[in-house]
Amino acid sequence: MMELSLDYNGVKEYSCVEYPLLMIDYAECVIPGRSAVAVKNLTNNEWFFQCHFPGNPVMPGTLEMEAIFQTAALAVHTLPGNKEKKSYIARVKDVGYFYHIRPGEIMQIKTVLKSWKHGVGQGEGMICIGDIIACKAKYTLVIEEDVVRKEE
């Protein structure tokens, strides 16, 4: 598969999410159907730092997961025929938070799609701040319109 790099507009082209919830500034490397690595530069002006927590700003864990999901979705939405479709997270497991992400830090979001079949993908992702693993999780991502449902 061909490797892609996407600037902010390229990320928006393949994303179902808009500012201020878009948690990716650019994608360093996307291999459709296989993996994606994206970056988010965090500033003091991020909306969530103003309220989480005043005087001790840290990135909310749910937004860390959102960054992983959005990066993982790039590996799916860059597959032929998936660009305009909507993807959703169906399951998250084995979540671990190991470091408080703060203003001024640069998140590198790494995801691997271990399987993709009939609109359902299984994968793993992590956020690194330099050499530090800040969080990681396993996930199931779906494109509902492509899910093959069997009658029981």
Image (cartoon, rainbow, N blue to C red):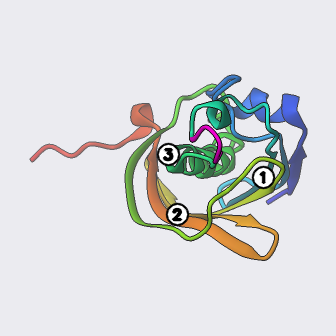
- Comes first in the chain, label 1 or label 2: 1
Assign a secondary structure to mark 3.
Answer: helix
Relative to 60, 141 lies left or right: left
Q: Nearer the viewer, mark 1 or mark 3?
A: 3
Which residue is at a point 68% across and 23% down the rendered structure image?
Answer: 18
Relative to 81, 96 lies left or right: left
Which residue is at a point 64% across and 48% down the rendered structure image?
Answer: 56
Q: Are marks 1 and 2 in contact (CB under 8 Å)?
A: no
Assign a secondary structure to mark 1.
Answer: strand
Q: How far apart are labels 1 and 3 at the CA level?
A: 17 Å
**Numbered range of the magenta stretch:** 53-57
Q: Amino acid at mark 3?
A: Thr
Relative to 56, 145 lies left or right: left
* Residue situated furthest bottom in the rendering: 131
Asked whether 13 or 101 is in front, the reply is 101
Q: The N terminus lies in which quarter of the figure?
A: bottom right
Q: Nearer the viewer, mark 3 or mark 2?
A: 3
Q: Is residue 41 above or below residue 19?
A: below
Q: Amino acid at mark 1?
A: Ala
Which residue is at a point 65% across and 56% down the rendered structure image?
Answer: 33
- Comes first in the chain, label 1 or label 3: 1
Q: Amino acid at mark 2?
A: Gly
- Circle on res. 38: 1
Q: Where does the image place residue 5, in percent across and percent down from the top left?
A: 89, 49
For residue 123, say whether it is visible: yes
- Circle on res. 121: none
Q: Which residue bears the numbered disc 3?
A: 62
- Dot 3, crowdedness within 10 Å: few (<14), some or many (≥20)? few
Which residue is at a point 63% across and 25% down the rendered structure image?
Answer: 84
- Circle on res. 123: 2
Quarter residue 95 falls in: bottom left
